[in-house]
Amino acid sequence: MNSNSDYIIEEAIRLVREGVSVTLPVDGQSMLPFIIGGKESVILQRPGLIDVGDVVLAWVENRRYVVHRIIQIDDDCVTLMGDGNLMGTEHCLLSDIKARVTHVVDAKERTHDINNRWRKLAAKMWFWLRPMRRYLLAIYKKVKW
């Protein structure tokens, strides 16, 4: 991320700490199919109590910010993975989680609760489909683009 992006994210984090909900555009394909980078934004709020399955903004491995899903919490250590990633995870401390994603704003400016029952169930099923993600994402990209 360039310094301008870091500045915007850090300002968003400051506002979230003050209790303000912040809408932040996302980039990249690491959260496909649930968040479409370059077309959608996320609404960030204070992290509060977090759990496996939550999508968060975190400072990972002391080098960059990501918006990814929590796949494991062991004491103070958190493991994250993008829904669109085929493999590979990031790690951070609980204190490195800066915000929790509560909603996705699509290209038509409609707001979708990312934590409703359907989306949680779909995300859980998607996690277990990791061995097939490569093929499912290829089909998704052909249909969507």
Image (cartoon, rainbow, N blue to C red):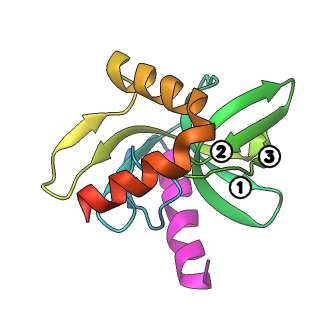
Does dot 3 land on a helix, a strand or a loop?
A: strand
Where are the magenta residues, as a range?
1-16
Q: In which quarter of the image is residue 77?
A: top right
In this picture, residue 71 sits left or right of residue 19: right
Tell me whether circle 2 and circle 1 mark residues in contact (CB < 8 Å). no
Which quarter of the rendering shows the C terminus?
A: bottom left
Does dot 1 land on a helix, a strand or a loop?
A: strand
Q: Name the residue rendered at 76%, 38% in the picture.
A: 79
Q: Residue 82: x, y in percent? A: 59, 48
The 10 Å Cα crowd at callout 1, few under 14, some 14 to 19, many 20 or more, is many
Answer whether residue 95 is magenta in the image: no
Q: Is residue 43 above or below residue 60?
A: above
Question: Which residue corresponds to mark 2?
Answer: 81
The 10 Å Cα crowd at callout 2, few under 14, some 14 to 19, many 20 or more, is many
Near-viewer residue (40 or 47)? 40
Q: Earlier in the sequence, mark 3 or mark 2?
A: 2
Q: Is residue 132 visible?
A: yes
Q: Name the residue rendered at 44%, 52% in the picture.
A: 137
Tell me whether circle 3 and circle 1 mark residues in contact (CB < 8 Å). yes
Circle 1: residue type:
Trp
Q: Residue furthest top?
A: 117
Question: Which residue corresponds to mark 1?
Answer: 59
Q: Name the residue rendered at 55%, 56% in the picture.
A: 14
Q: Name the residue rendered at 63%, 39% in the picture.
A: 131
Q: Residue 136: x, y in percent? A: 44, 46
Q: Main secondary structure of the magenta part?
A: helix
Near-viewer residue (34 or 139)? 139
Question: Which residue corresponds to mark 3?
Answer: 92
Q: Is residue 124 above or below residue 77?
A: above
Q: Which of marks 3 and 1 is nearer the N terminus?
A: 1
Does dot 2 land on a helix, a strand or a loop?
A: strand
